[in-house]
Image (cartoon, helix red, strand yellow):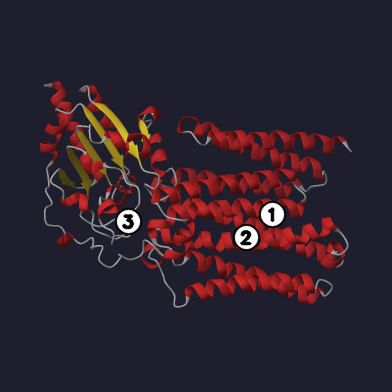
Amino acid sequence: MTSNVIIANLGYLVSISCFIVGIKRLSRVRTARSANVLAASAMLIAVASQLIELETVDYRYVVAGVIVGASIGAVLAFKVAMTAMPQLVAVFNGFGGAASLLVGLSLFAAIQERGTLAEVMIGSTSGLGTGLTLLLSIVIGAVTFSGSILAYLKLSDRYGSVFGKSILLPQRHLITLSLFALSLGLCAALLMFLANPVVSTFAIICVALFALLLGVAVVLPIGGADMPVVVSLLNSYSGLAASATGFALNSPVLIVSGALVGASGLILTQIMCKGMNRSLANVMIGGFGGESAEGAGSGDASAYTNVKSSDVEESALTFESARDVIIVPGYGLAVAQGQSAVAEFASHLKGLGVRVRYAIHPVAGRMPGHMNVLLAESNIPYDELFEMDEINSDFRSSDIVLVVGANDVVNPAAKTDPSSPLYGMPILNVDQAPIVYVIKRSLSPGFAGVKNELFDLDNCRMIFGDAKKVLEELSVHLDLAKAA
């Protein structure tokens, strides 16, 4: 074993350790930023170790790739708004899948140049494993890539009006199963005709094409309400594809890092499904979020009969006399870019001696952890953020609950209306609070497309307007109250 290989293996060990610790630290808001830096450093160490092991590498291409990639990353970091983070995560997942797909195809081409895939696989357990994992990396990578790009289109403000709804094709389940069967059948045909380079090449290209179509077929019927789950699941797929590619390349660091991403993505997906009280199969098959369920009630303003509104000045007077306020952030807060405004408003409340906490629903926003990241961006103390299970019993004893841009996650129909598509989904029990203020532009529905029964309750007051502007005006009135 040469010194380069020894150094590279040590680098792999350090990299794998950093990946494990980094993912562990991502589970807490307080350590998430440092965890991200640690995981990025682990990837840098892994790449450097791989280059050391290869020895004969044209570094001009490596440097060019680093410059291009770093430039794109820097631009995205500065330009992409918080509301576009789900789309960006979807694209990143897609790039991970595309990388696995391209590496698998290039490895197949390299093997064919040396002879045929049969010579590698036949009569060798390791060769058979290489071939099987190569096919897995291509199939999973292709599904991840096409599915993630479609997820991006569904989440995009520009294309969401076309792709965002649940698109239910006739016989869609049959189409999906057929594409899956064709992908598996072509993989089997490839293994049967390994000695024929023309047939095997044609088969592997068809495998990739059918897998790309399968990714589209799987994501197409899924509506906006389920996109957080889909993004999490596609993230898991990208890790599994990377792990399969690692087996094909005999790269321990890629195997472990991919497996970590795959496993953590599956765990997060399960947490998201639990937060919606739905199974993963129901999410992938149900097409929830595209249309209102029959009998669930529409989200039109005409569906409401008891809505009471309040102006900012009147609302501020109520907040002045409160002693315990719980703030529930939602996607509308991100759209209004009001995270700094809500932090300032909370600061004014605390200046008046009010206890302020934030209630975070597992599926609030459009991706896992969206609200946590949004609030952390404004340096809101971590100990003021509470998950649903921790704070749900406290709404009844609070003085005021302020809902900012949240909708489906506070809809009492989830508990009272069996005909609602939200029925059975755990929600934040804001309806139990003595007073609930909801900042919203209009009475438009959330992702589920149904009426929010909260707006008709006697203890609810609507403050119509842009979330950022309303919060800023509330802060001004509280500041005047403090000065007086």
| Left or right, residue 295 beside residue 35 | left
Task: Using the rendered image of the protein, determine whether residue 468 is visible from the camera's viewpoint.
Answer: no
Label 2: which residue? 140
Residue at the image point whose x is 32% and y is 56% from the top: 422
Looking at the picture, how far across and down is residue 420, in whole percent?
Answer: 29, 60
Q: Quick one: label 2 or label 3, which is nearer the N terminus? A: 2
Locate residue 43, reporting x and y percent.
65, 40
Secondary-structure class at tag 3 = loop
* Labels 2 & 3 near each other (Cβ < 8 A): no
Q: Is residue 136 visible?
A: yes
Label 2 packing within 10 angstroms: few (<14), some (14-19), many (20+): many
In which quadrant will I find the C terminus? Answer: top left
Instruction: Please give the name of the residue rendered at 66% of the width and 60% of the height, measured from the top-left corner.
Output: 101
Q: Distance between the residues labelled 1 and 2?
A: 9 Å
| Camera-side residue of 42 and 128 | 128
Which amino acid lies under the numbered mark 2 shown in the image of this protein? Ile
Which residue was labeled with disc 1?
A: 244
Of callouts 1 and 3, the N-terminal one: 1
* Front disc: 1 or 3: 3
Q: Above or below — where is 358 with respect to 404?
A: above
Residue type at tag 3: Leu
Q: Do the residues labelled 1 and 2 touch (CB within 8 Å)?
A: yes
Q: Could you say whether the residue bearing mark 1 is in a helix, strand or loop? A: helix
Residue that mark 3 sits on: 422
- The image quadrant that residue 153 belongs to is bottom left
CA gap between label 1 and label 3 equals 37 Å
Residue at mark 2 to residue at mark 3: CA–CA distance: 31 Å
Element type where label 2 sits in the image: helix
Residue drawn at 49 percent across, 49 percent down: 270
Picture layout, residue 25 above or below residue 305: above
Instruction: State yes or no: discs 1 and 3 in contact (Cβ < 8 Å).
Output: no
In the displayed structure, does residue 357 sit left or right of residue 62? left
